[in-house]
Amino acid sequence: MSRTDLPNPDLIVIPARFGSKRLPGKPLVPIAGRTLLERVAHVAREASRMAGGIDILVATDDPRIEAHARDLGCEAVMTASDISSGSGRAHAAALSRAERPEIVVNLQGDAPFMPPEVVARLIEAARSSAAAAATPVTRMGWAELDRLRDHKTRAPFSGTTCIRAADGRALWFSKNIIPAIRDEAERRKQSPVSPVFQHLGLYAYRFDALERFEQAPPSHYEQIEGLEQLRLLEMGLDILTVEVAPPRFAVSGIDTPEDVALAETLIAELGDPCGA
């Protein structure tokens, strides 16, 4: 039986809150002629086309965003305004389905430049694994690592790195750059890439694991680091990391008017990933 024949397709959820202190009404903000939500919906549709057997659902707390999603041809569901995280909104959206999906992808509504092929590859990896969740990482070259180190002198909690086992299981995530690198000068001579993996904020959960995650209280290290994925590890659940190429657009998310301006500059320079 193909994925498209299954009675309960997997689900991509796009959490899209209206409230944002730095960029109110963020999903409706235009970026080079297309709203942020339109751009993320395009990513979801392309990923669905590549992987097959996937429904797309916008989860919001505002009727203006719900109406815009429907204008874009997307199914939308209203979720509680007091849900504070994308994973919580993804869980609420999955619960609204008549049949529970096996895989739930949390495609953040402020990530218009996530490559659709990364989303599709993550879904395929999650389907073939028994892990609680799957998430992408990219191995950093030395120049990228140097830039991240410099950036962290100004924004120490921006950017997450990951240590992973040989089989791809995540061992830990941190806002610090891990691992510490002994004999770095020699390692730079030996390889063009560093041993550091940067985490990309995208998750494909098994529904039962997402439900357990949402029912559990924030964990000790999750609260210290401010990284919700550590809750899964502290619960003893496996996270599969999937190595992918670095994204072409160096904007992880749209959070401020400055991010919008940078995104429009990159689109002008590199072309529009949504096409003409």
Image (cartoon, rainbow, N blue to C red):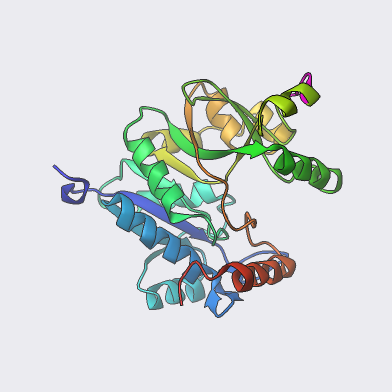
Q: How many marks?
A: 0
Q: Position of residue 223 (x, y in %)?
A: 69, 34
Residue at 53%, 44% in the rendered image? 245
Q: Nearer the viewer, residue 79 or 25?
A: 25
Residue occupying image coordinates x 50% and y 76%? 64
Q: Is residue 192 above or below residue 68?
A: above
75 to 7, vertically: above or below: below
* 141 magenta-colored: no
Front-most of residues 203 and 88: 203
In the rendered image of this protein, does residue 158 appear above or below residue 175? below
- Considering every residue shown, the one lying at the far right of the view is 153
Going 73% across and 42% down the picture, which residue do you hit? Answer: 143
Q: Residue furthest left?
A: 1
* Residue 97 appears in the picture as rendered: no
Q: Is residue 180 magenta?
A: yes
Report if residue 212 is visible in the image: yes
Magenta segment, principal secondary structure? loop
Residue 134 in percent (x, y) is at 45, 36
- Residue 210 x, y percent position in the rendering: 44, 38
Quarter where residue 75 is shown: bottom left
The residue under the point 78% across, 40% down is 146
Residue at the far front in the pictured view: 189
**From the image, which quarter does the N terminus lie in?**
top left
Pick the residue in front: 6 or 63. Answer: 6
Tell me which corner region of the image, top left, top right, bottom left or bottom right, holds residue 261: bottom right
Residue 201, position as x, y percentages in the image: 57, 46
Q: Which residue is at the far bottom?
A: 33
The region drawn magenta spans 179-184
Examine the image and state in which quarter residue 2 appears: top left
